[in-house]
Amino acid sequence: MKINKKEIISKFKKKINQYKKYNELYFTKDNPAISDEKFDNLKQEILDLENQHKFLSKYGSIKTLVGSKLSGKFEKIAHKKRMLSLSNAFNLKDLEDFEKKIKNFLNLKDAIEFSFEPKIDGISASLRYENGKLLYGLSRGDGEFGENITQNLNTINEIPKNLIGSPNIIEVRGEVYIGKKDFEKIKGNFANPRNAAGGSLRQKNPKETAKIPLKFFAYGIGEIKPSILTKQSEVLEKLKKWGFQINQHCKIMKNLKEVEKTHSNLEGIRSSLDYDLDGVVLKVNNLNLQDRLGSTSNSPRWAIAYKFSSVKALSRIRNIAIQVGRTGAITPVAKIDPVTVGGVVVSNATLHNEDEIIRKDIRVGDFVTIQRAGDVIPQVLSVDKTKRNEKNKKFIFPDKCLCGFPTKKEISTSTKKVDAVRRCTRGYECQYIAREKLKHFVSKEALNIEGLGKKVVDNFWDLNLIKRPSDVFFLDYKKISKLEGWGKLSIENLRKAIDKAREISLQRFIFSIGIRHIGQENAKILANFFKNSKKFSELFYPKKRKSILENLDDLDGIGETQVRSLDSFFSNKKNCDIVKKLILSIKVKDFKKTSKSGIFSNKSIMFTGGFEKMSRSEAKALAEENGAKILGSVSKKLNCLVIGNSKPTKKKIEKAKTLKVELIYEDEWYKLLNR
Ligand code: IVH
């Protein structure tokens, strides 16, 4: 077959331009325009063209474009200790709440010492050293698994390849970055130093990485054996001794006032530093306390990111639109004249809810201040009423959902107050909610289907390719292959990602269905209770459901709100049909007990009364660490009742005695756990 050279050249040019555009979008915003798969496929298509037709080299080459992002071809390695993210604080009040929570958890009255560290805006990496030698280096990845980017990390001079006098095993964690001055020299396609660092670290060719002057600040450790350190400040000192760069602004702080002052001083000199900072990280300095505090699903309880103040800009509201979330929450969104806030173009800003609009008296046509802080959704901060046109009318909040059905403001079961948020309560019956539920279903924390991002879901929804969760497993790939942007390779990748998701843990499955008030933690508790999907399916049948829900009340963490929500979800026929069909389309794996083989392994325990040396939350976390299942009421199923010295409930003790439940008093509890 005679090849048409002209056509190939024009195809090549078009694709390379597309690639440049997406590449830039990816590095400029944190919200890439296309999925990773599509991006990689595009890259592969260009590479194929280049390899097949040597004459194309005249028209450029993808190989010379720096900043190609991860191709998905790096080997994945499990982090021995998860790489968590941090929750954010924006003001002193947030910091005080953080400290209060820590003190409550530890049941501590004494002041807490903190390690204050600049939050370098780069890319995190974890370096594993065994017997003093750098074994491998990983990217953060999804926090559980990182990508093996050793070769690229090896090009960084500030990363020592050998450590002298270090423990046998040590994982050093830190931030890879590019100095601002160096960045000016290599800028190219990149919007900022962070993106340049990320792009170079993920080059497939280490020679390309070596051309970029990457640097490294160490800020912590993962696994360490033997464990010789007791304070975060000591960690930093030792890291320095072993040859790492430690940021010079790291300090020990005795109180939050000092933190506030140093934070604002640092913000003042921020622009004179040769690296980008987006705030500071505050860590409990004592490693033993860090250990006791542990972490929630995504972030440690012992650290927080205290961001620098947010960025503001002025704009004008063109319209107020309504968005429906997956829980039916109706959120008003201001459509504003596009404005750049801190380097990002913003054209939507949240107005939170009806009360907020009334309180701030926000109207269409108003001139407003927009605020964007970190990765938080931009919001309308205030209205400049002096500039208001008298004709701007008050916004009448619709009392109907976009689906046309009336919305409700619920009354909270715990506070008995009327909720500020209006909701559509039709669940999957409302197409707007159903679409959002689908997005949740395929999201990272649920089925984790790469390549089925929000935009793709919207697209597939509009084309009637998916309407219910189970449809994901019966996609019409023929139809998809006719859509723009879907080549052979991207379809194959999508198919693979979906096939991978066909087998799912019970815990993820429960979370993915999107039952209100059932988040990741509750889904885990429920999975532990139901053990398998067969038992879980009993919720479909009213009588069985009733008795199950009565038992659920016993589970610690599951309260009236969750029980009601489960009841209302499974009382709805459509919901049941959707879940039934889903169970038939996938394989839900039985719950695997991950509980440690500790002294309470296979035992159910309950607490009554307060403890002197620890809070109830810490006691619970500790018991779970040691294999216990925590119950919330005394019944025959209970093995031990743990009784704190402060105000235990007599009735519970009496009942436990009659049921011959083992009693553990506070002193004995400490002894059992070596505390
Ligand atoms: S501590 C669980 N310390 O911030 C502890 N992180 O949002 C998390 N970062 O992924 C890490 N400077 O990339 C820590 N001094 C510092 C840091 C720092 C920058 C980054 C790091 C992390 C992200 C968390």
Image (cartoon, helix red, strand yellow):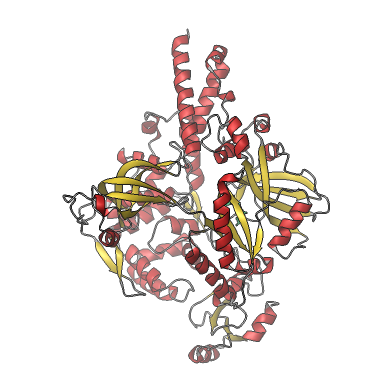
Percent coordinates x, y for residue 456 in the rendering: 39, 39
Task: Name above or below for residue 591 compared with residue 434.
Answer: below
- Residue located 27% across and 58% down the image: 357
Residue 356 appears at what percent x and percent y?
A: 30, 60
Identity of the residue drawn at 58% across and 18% down: 51
Q: In which image quadrant can residue 569 be found?
A: bottom left
Tell me, yes or no, if residue 532 can be seen here: yes
Residue beneath the point at 67% across and 67% down: 286
Viewer-nearest residue: 334 or 313 = 313
Farthest residue, direction left: 391
Who is closer to the viewer here, 566 or 103? Answer: 103
Question: Would you say 505 lies left or right of 463 here?
Answer: right
Residue 555, how many percent across, how many down?
48, 73
Residue 36 position within the rendered picture, expressed as x and y whole percent measured from the top left: 50, 37
In the current view of this chain or complex, which residue is farthest to the right?
Answer: 165
Instruction: State whether residue 300 appears in this view.
Output: no
How many dots with numbers? 0
User: Which of the image's four quarters has the C terminus?
Assistant: bottom right
Compared with 237, 147 (above or below) is above
Splitting the image into 4 quarters, where does residue 200 fall?
Answer: top right
Q: Nearer the viewer, residue 306 or 299?
A: 306
> Residue 233 versus residue 332: which sits nearer the camera?
233
